[in-house]
Amino acid sequence: MRSIQTHISWVFIASPFVFKVKKPVNLGFADFSTRERRRHFCQREVELNRRLCPEVYLGVVPIFKTASGFSFNGEGEIAEYCVKMKELSRGWFLSELLTKNLVGEAEINRVLSRLHRFYQSQSPGPKIDLWGTPEKLKISTDENFAQVEPFAGKTISPAAFETVRHFTNRFYAVHGKRFRERIQQHRIRDCHGDLHLDHIHITPDTLSIFDCIEFNDRFRFIDVVNDVAFLAMDFDFEGRSDLANLLLRNAARQFQDVAMLKIASFYKCYRAFVRGKVESILGTEKETRNPQEHEKQAARYFRLALRYAVTDSEPSVLAVMGRVGTGKTTVAERLASELDWPIFSSDKIRKTLAGAPLAERTAPELREKIYSDEMTEQTYRELLRQGLAALENRHGVVLDATFSSRTYREFLRQECEKAKVHLQVIELDVDRATIASRLKARDQSAGEISDARLEDLEKLTAAYEPPSELAADLIKISANDSAFDTVKTALFQLSETRLH
């Protein structure tokens, strides 16, 4: 017999059956604290899951305590209740098919067809509609933030936590009309609520969508796009954004609901944050065998939630620019770390192309050659080449360069347009006294890659052309504060661009 545990259940696999026992826990959103409550929710689990896979859920059975241990036969005192299910054959769960590269449009359309029929069979009504309002949705998102706050600084960075919360609450404020339209269009239904890869079993002849939410109605009384967004988020998490986008596009067409695409990223952010919360909780439980693995997974989910909050669904280039000494490299590196994106630095590329040591200041006699117009052009071409190449298998990249010339900014814009990637530019601005102080400090700093020093300030300032032509894609940030505050401000500002 094999066993699996989640944050709220123990699952025992005794072929050809599976027995699911609820843990005696009260997590606020799920209360199984008494045996009677556990029996009630076992019955609810069977009733609700028979809507999508009646053949799998066999019923609720008591577990008896006997002199020799526990038994399913009818003797002794009832110790617990469990859900009895048919075991589904290994190798056909959507998560397993994905690892074998066996998920394509045909499989996605089969799932969507089943879901479409299911959603249509669930009648909307005033009680369910109510859960589509921002006020009701905030109950769940506020609860998530309260429960994740103790993990800030552990599985989620404080800046990421604050940004996702900011984005979520601002989205409600800005898009109240959109939520009301979803209710008027009867898009709020009694859904599945936990629709991810491991809960879909698909063979050539059968399709089972199982393990819906039974313990809290508000997690099921949701917008259909909230339900489907969980599956899309799971594809993104597994590095298959192509399938995530295909799923949402085809769902919009099949459900005749183009408007769902405008709100899908909000719900994907919510779903990734919930998974991060669940993995964080699992990492703290005494029975957990490998807490570090859960913490690692939680951090990945939280970074994904942050990406949904600050960038578009298409591949993105985030360019961090500004005058010398504004802290570009520090801020760019921290943003790359927050988003788990690769970073490409013009200073590193320039010195690498010239064959100069990275951590030493270039000798005066070589500087003219390294900083010639020809070498600068070569550097920016290589910066863009490397950055755009990395987007073949990453969602986004960070570029760290002054982009002091309008010519190179235009080159950046054109290359991103040609590659069909979203460009966002952050310009850091710092008062002159702070810049002078930072450049002076570089003389004592070991391992500084940039060659710019205090004596170069006048010349570099005169050569800097303010990026007024980038107005639509530009976020200008004062970087006089600490690097943490600057990064948080940058993330907040990026999330604001996602709201319009």
Image (cartoon, rainbow, N blue to C red):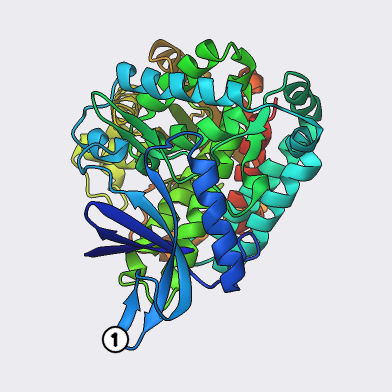
Judge whether 261 appears above or below 331 on screen: above
Judged left or right of residue 351, residue 142 is right
* SS label for mark 1: loop
As rendered, which of 27 and 413 lies closer to the eye? 27
Looking at the image, can residue 455 be seen? Answer: no
Q: Residues within 10 Å of mark 1 (few under 14, many from 20)?
A: few
Quadrant for the N terminus, please: bottom left
Determine the image quadrant of residue 205. top left
Residue name at image x 28 percent, y 32 percent: 369
Judged left or right of residue 41, residue 244 is left
Which residue is situated farthest in the bottom direction here? 67
As rendered, which of 310 and 53 lies closer to the eye? 53
Quadrant for the C terminus, please: top right
Which residue position holds label 1?
68
Judged left or right of residue 310, residue 245 is left
Judged left or right of residue 469, residue 177 is right
Residue name at image x 29 percent, y 86 percent: 68
Residue name at image x 65 percent, y 57 percent: 145
Q: Position of residue 386 (x, y in %)?
A: 29, 29
Which residue is situated farthest in the front direction here? 75
Judge whether 110 appears above or below 288 on screen: above
Q: Position of residue 467 (x, y in %)?
A: 60, 24
Residue name at image x 24 percent, y 40 percent: 96
Looking at the image, can residue 63 be seen? Answer: yes
Q: Position of residue 177 (x, y in %)?
A: 81, 25
- The amino acid type of the residue labelled 1 equals Ser
> Tag count in the figure?
1
Q: Position of residue 478 (x, y in %)?
A: 68, 45
